[in-house]
Image (spheres, grey):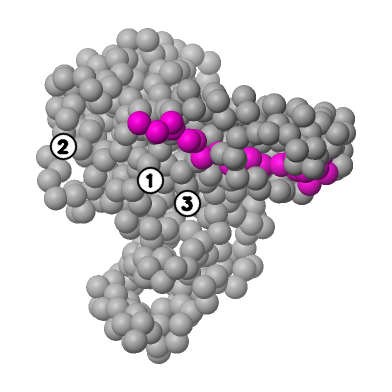
């Protein structure tokens, strides 16, 4: 019975994601980063198996990085990541689960955040002028800044010395120089991105509803977001799944590209390269904004990687469920490609990418000297942009 | 109203602390029945994920115990435990849970009395703090 139900559900999903349009061309398999580093993984055969009503393996279901490169290149526009997400949702309903990394710490944090009475204490480390709004405050906030999981990740990955909170400090300072003074909500929850893509839809909905309730109570109008994953989730998924979402979600990098004044200070000459993280680029369609910001900077020379924009390489890991030798190889390839540009800094809008790349650098001494990574926002701030 | 009885998960390492708990038992020492003991091979096996899971599933406090520094059966497992507990304390503080709800204690196999005493103190401390604010709806 259960099997029959799930079979008809798979048929439905095949319709929804238009997987039946697969023409068996195998462009996806050739593009797939996992396939590229020698691991046998093929979105094509995955789809073909399902079309022929064979169940693909449990492992294959969680293997996909949902980086979206296959979808971008597919001539039939098959949304493979979306297909995977829906299948994961079905799998979770049947009690199957992915194996989390870091002993499931990050997943536990997400689950604990669904407690309605929790009063998180997460605003330390932000500039002094930023006023946190507690859930009990009766206040009309207007503009808020959504921090995301940076404070937690900074604690967990302290040894990587990435200074993840600097990104948000810089973003807030730069916004202030554009005459925006956002508040921060102290009881902000995880955006639910990882739960969403891992197929744990109930968890995603719990977090989304709690966040939206907090926004509503605080009288929020505009939400500024720097993390590409949070931006993607808030701007593109919340309006789809939350009944009433009257808020304007603004990507900080895009906002700065439109509003930041051209810097007057000339610093020493430096060449940088830029990594389009998947949620910023292929999913968020923000390719030119960061480049415009960089091209406006005096003394900064942007050298593109061979694979850029829609074709950008993957950082090798996501959702805190995929990490193994394949991830390490992808991270190595990404770092080496960045180093080949001759740039001294790899700028990236996503701090999770930076964590994954730093992990590979920490484990492999040879990669340590390849290239330094920095968040594009903190780089702008460091260069003295006003 | 009845007195609040906290639920506490106590992790004890196989080589020292669990034996210490055993000694407390065979010596007929009294300590409150609020702890649920989980034996692990080494305190170094305890990760933030495990501790957070205990909290998520309704623990009001978590008690981690291992061999004294220098006595670890696996040389440096307890050093690792120390770091993991410290990190978890930071994480629960960010989440809005009192860091005092997580306690680390070194207890050797001969320290039955210390086991009973530190558990009694910890249960009392959690009783003062009250129920954990975590109530996972998911």
Q: Residue at x 16, y 20 (%)?
A: A138
Q: Residue at x 40, y 38 (%)?
A: B134
Q: Which mark is residue A252?
A: none
Q: Secondary structure at mark 3?
A: loop
Q: Separation of disc 3 and disc 2 at Cα?
A: 26 Å
Q: Residue at x 40, y 89 (%)?
A: A52
Marks 3 and 2, the one that precedes in the sequence: 2
Q: Separation of disc 1 and disc 3 at Cα?
A: 21 Å
* Chain for disc number 1: B
Foreground residue, A347 or A265?
Answer: A347
Q: Secondary structure at mark 2?
A: loop
Q: Separation of disc 1 and disc 2 at Cα?
A: 27 Å
Q: Are marks 3 and 2 on the same chain?
A: yes
Quadrant where the image shows the N terminus of chain A: bottom left
Please determine whether, in this image, residue A42 is positioned above or below residue A171. below
The residue labelled by disc 1 is: B136
Regarding residue B133, the answer to whether it shows in the image is yes
Quadrant where the image shows the C terminus of chain A: top left
**Segment colored magenta:** B1-22
Residue A211: name its quadrant: top left
Foreground residue, A305 or A290?
Answer: A290
The residue labelled by disc 2 is: A247
Residue A374 point in image, percent of width and height:
52, 30
The residue labelled by disc 3 is: A319
Residue lying at the far bottom of the rendered structure: A52
Residue A180 point in image, percent of width and height:
23, 18
Residue A372: name its quadrant: top right
């Amino acid at each position: 019975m259960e099997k029959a139900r799930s079979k008809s559900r798979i048929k439905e999903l095949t319709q929804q994601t238009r997987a039946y349009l697969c023409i068996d061309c195998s462009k996806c398999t050739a593009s797939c980063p996992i396939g590229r580093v020698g691991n046998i993984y093929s979105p094509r055969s995955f789809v073909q198996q399902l079309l022929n009503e064979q169940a693909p393996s449990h492992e294959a279901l969680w293997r996909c990085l949902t980086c979206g490169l296959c979808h971008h290149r597919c001539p039939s526009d098959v949304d493979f990541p979306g297909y995977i997400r829906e299948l994961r949702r079905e799998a979770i309903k049947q009690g199957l689960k992915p194996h989390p990394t870091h002993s499931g710490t990050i997943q536990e944090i997400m689950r604990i955040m669904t407690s309605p009475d929790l009063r998180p204490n997460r605003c330390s480390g932000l500039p002094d002028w930023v006023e946190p709004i507690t859930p009990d405050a009766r206040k009309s906030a207007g503009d808020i800044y959504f921090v995301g999981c940076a404070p937690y990740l900074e604690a967990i990955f302290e040894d990587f010395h990435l200074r993840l909170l600097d990104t948000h400090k810089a973003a807030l300072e730069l916004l202030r120089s554009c005459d925006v003074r956002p508040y921060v909500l102290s009881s902000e929850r995880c955006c639910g991105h990882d739960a969403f893509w891992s197929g744990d839809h109930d968890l995603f909905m719990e977090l989304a509803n709690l966040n939206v309730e907090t926004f509503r109570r605080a009288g929020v109008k505009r939400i500024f977001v720097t993390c590409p994953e949070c931006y993607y989730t808030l701007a593109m998924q919340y309006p789809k799944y939350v009944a009433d979402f009257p808020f304007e979600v603004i990507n900080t990098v895009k906002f700065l590209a439109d509003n930041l004044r051209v810097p007057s200070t000339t610093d020493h000459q430096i060449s940088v390269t830029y990594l389009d993280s998947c949620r910023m680029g292929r999913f968020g369609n923000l390719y030119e904004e960061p480049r415009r910001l960089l091209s406006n900077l005096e003394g900064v020379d942007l050298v593109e990687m061979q694979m850029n924009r829609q074709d950008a390489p993957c950082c090798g890991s996501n959702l805190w469920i995929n990490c193994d030798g394949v991830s390490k190889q992808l991270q190595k390839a990404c770092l080496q490609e960045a180093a080949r540009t001759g740039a001294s800094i790899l700028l990236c809008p996503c701090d999770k990418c930076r964590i994954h790349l730093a992990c590979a650098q920490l484990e492999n001494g040879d990669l340590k000297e390849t290239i330094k990574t920095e968040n594009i926002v903190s780089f702008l701030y460091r260069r003295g942009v006003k | 109203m009845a007195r609040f009885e906290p639920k506490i998960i106590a992790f004890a390492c196989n080589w020292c602390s669990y034996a210490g708990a055993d000694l407390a038992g065979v010596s007929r020492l009294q300590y409150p029945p609020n702890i649920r003991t989980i034996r692990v091979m080494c305190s170094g096996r305890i990760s933030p994920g495990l501790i957070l899971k205990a909290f998520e599933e309704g623990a009001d406090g978590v008690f981690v115990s291992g061999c004294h520094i220098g006595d670890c059966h696996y040389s440096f497992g307890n050093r690792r435990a120390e770091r993991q507990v410290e990190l978890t304390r930071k994480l629960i503080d960010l989440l809005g849970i009192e860091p005092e709800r997580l306690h680390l204690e070194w207890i050797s196999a001969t320290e039955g009395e210390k086991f009973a005493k530190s558990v009694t103190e910890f249960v009392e401390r959690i009783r003062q703090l009250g129920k954990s604010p975590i109530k996972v709806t998911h």
